[in-house]
Amino acid sequence: TMGLALFLPLIVNIACLFQTLRRNSVHSSPELLFGVSSLVMILAGALFGIPLLLGAEQSSKSYYMLGHFHYLFGPGAIFAFFAGVYSFGSQIFGKKLNETLSYLHFWPTLFGMNVVFLPMVILGVLGIAGEDILESGVSVAREVVFLQQISSSGVFFLLVSQLPFLLNCLFAICRPEFWARFDMLQERASAAIQPGSTY
């Protein structure tokens, strides 16, 4: 019942946010894509939680619970962080981040997140518990090993897909506008700690 009390307001909130986007003239931008993807990933995690709400037998150590938990909390926070960085990048770096590198960052990250977490949900649906494989040394089917390998290789792909973001930030830091803004903020900070300062 507690899960249901959390689930229904979340669905209403996400529906309202999508309705707001639908009624406004919105142009595609990296921050919008990351923001909407954050909501979609949270929604996917919430939808994977419906069987748990309805009383499906899932132990807390099952792959299904692991996939549900990661879909619900991991990608939503990470995508929201990137949406914030791209949205406020002009204020942080003094100039908007490169849009091409931003798109090159978004699509592989979205793909990588799903490659990492979706096999966990599939393994959970198949009834595989993580502790069964690790502790008992049970021989498992090739399909299970294959799904685990996909999930593990997805982590590497996800890490590599962060390179465009790091390059984008590095290029922004190397711009003279960034350092001029940094010097200005440093002067304000040093002036603020002087006795008799008006800041």
Image (cartoon, grey):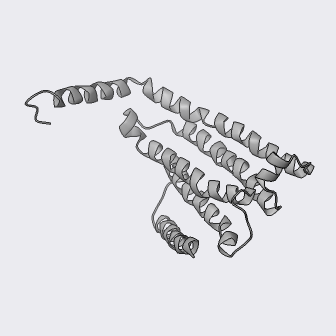
The quadrant where residue 192 appears: top left
Measuring from the top left, give residue 166's x and y in whole percent: 54, 31
The quadrant where residue 154 appears: top right
For the residue pair 176 and 76, the one nearer the viewer reads as 76
Image position of 119 with respect to 184: above or below: below
- Image quadrant for the N terminus? bottom right
For the residue pair 141 and 181, the one nearer the viewer reads as 141
Measuring from the top left, give residue 30's x and y in whole percent: 52, 47
Residue at horizontal 64 percent and vertical 62 percent from the top: 44
Residue at horizontal 47 percent and vertical 36 percent from the top: 97
Instruction: Count how many numbered circles sit on residues in the image.
Output: 0
Does residue 28 show up?
no
Image position of 15 with respect to 132: above or below: below
Does residue 64 show up?
yes
- Residue 132 in the figure: left or right of residue 172: right
- Image quadrant for the C terminus? top left
Measuring from the top left, give residue 28's x and y in whole percent: 53, 52
Measuring from the top left, give residue 85's x and y in whole percent: 46, 42
* Outermost residue to the front: 136
Residue at horizontal 55 percent and vertical 71 percent from the top: 11
